[in-house]
Image (cartoon, rainbow, N blue to C red):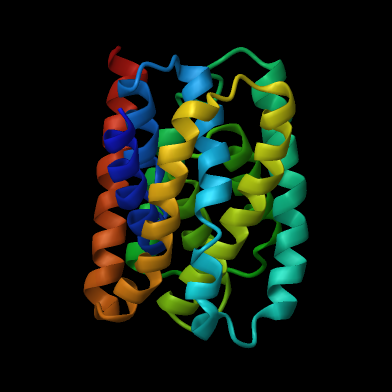
Amino acid sequence: MWLLLFGAGIAAGVSGTIAGLASLFSYPALLLAGLPATAANVTNTVALALGSITAVPSSRRELAGQAATVRKLGTVCALGGAGGAALLLVTPPGIFQRIVPFLIGGASVVILLRPRFRGATAGVFAASVYSGYFAAASGVLLLALLLATTSGGLLRANALKNVLVVITDVVAAAGFAVFGPVDWVRAVPLTAGLLLGSWLGPMIARKVPEAPLRAGIALAGLGLAVKLGVDAFMS
């Protein structure tokens, strides 16, 4: 079990810091390790909060000059993450299940087509609420919003996304640690793998040309949207 979760953590860290798809690996691994859905969800968020922190120093080159944006959107993400965590603890499970595939699919199309919009605040808040509730692919939503509303290219937007995801997850995880059914035994190896994978991810992203990286992120997001849609509407 520990080896499974450690390996899943590495894969989640790399994919999360590059594409925002950490939970594609971490959440199913927790289910395979025997956790029920709600416990897997909150344990996943706690592990992501602790294990993704290494993405911040690893992304420092791309974060240069973005301190003001981090402060502004980080506050928004903290509020949204707290709200999403509260929703998870007080609402019936699965309330977002049927809309999540459309959110992720739409975000993937935005990443691929590169439209431009004004103002990221409202969208970032909504994405952080979702992230606090259910972390799967929330990074894709944030990355799409940042690419459409900020300048500087994919790597700078991705680095900003990494910081905002950490802020959101830390706030949500604080609530789950006190009030949620966190499985700390399973969180430890997953977090250890995430620490390594999250450090490696930004370094790998720098070595991949932007166009194929953007296309790969979008296609992976669309694939996840289809899978979640099948799970939501066909099961």
**Residue found 59% across the figure and 86% down from its top:** 64
Answer with the quarter of the image where residue 110 lies.
bottom left
**Residue found 41% across the figure and 75% down from its top:** 154
Instruction: Report whether residue 78 is seen.
Output: yes
Give the side of residue 75 with respect to residue 131, left or right.
right
In the displayed structure, would residue 125 be above or below residue 229?
A: below
Q: Nearer the viewer, residue 203 or 68?
A: 203
**Residue found 42% across the figure and 51% down from its top:** 194
Q: Position of residue 67 (x, y in %)?
A: 70, 79
**Residue found 75% across the figure and 55% down from its top:** 76
In the displayed structure, would residue 63 be above or below residue 80?
A: below
Give the side of residue 120 with respect to residue 10, left or right.
right
Q: Position of residue 99 (x, y in %)?
A: 48, 30
Quarter the C terminus occupies: top left
Q: Position of residue 107 (x, y in %)?
A: 43, 52
Quarter the N terminus occupies: top left
Q: Nearer the viewer, residue 111 or 142?
A: 142
In the displayed structure, would residue 234 be above or below residue 223?
A: above
Instruction: Report whether residue 148 is seen.
Output: no
Give the side of residue 223 with respect to residue 101, left or right.
left
Q: Position of residue 21 (x, y in %)?
A: 38, 49
**Count of numbered badges drawn on the protein:** 0
In the displayed structure, would residue 216 be above or below residue 104?
A: below
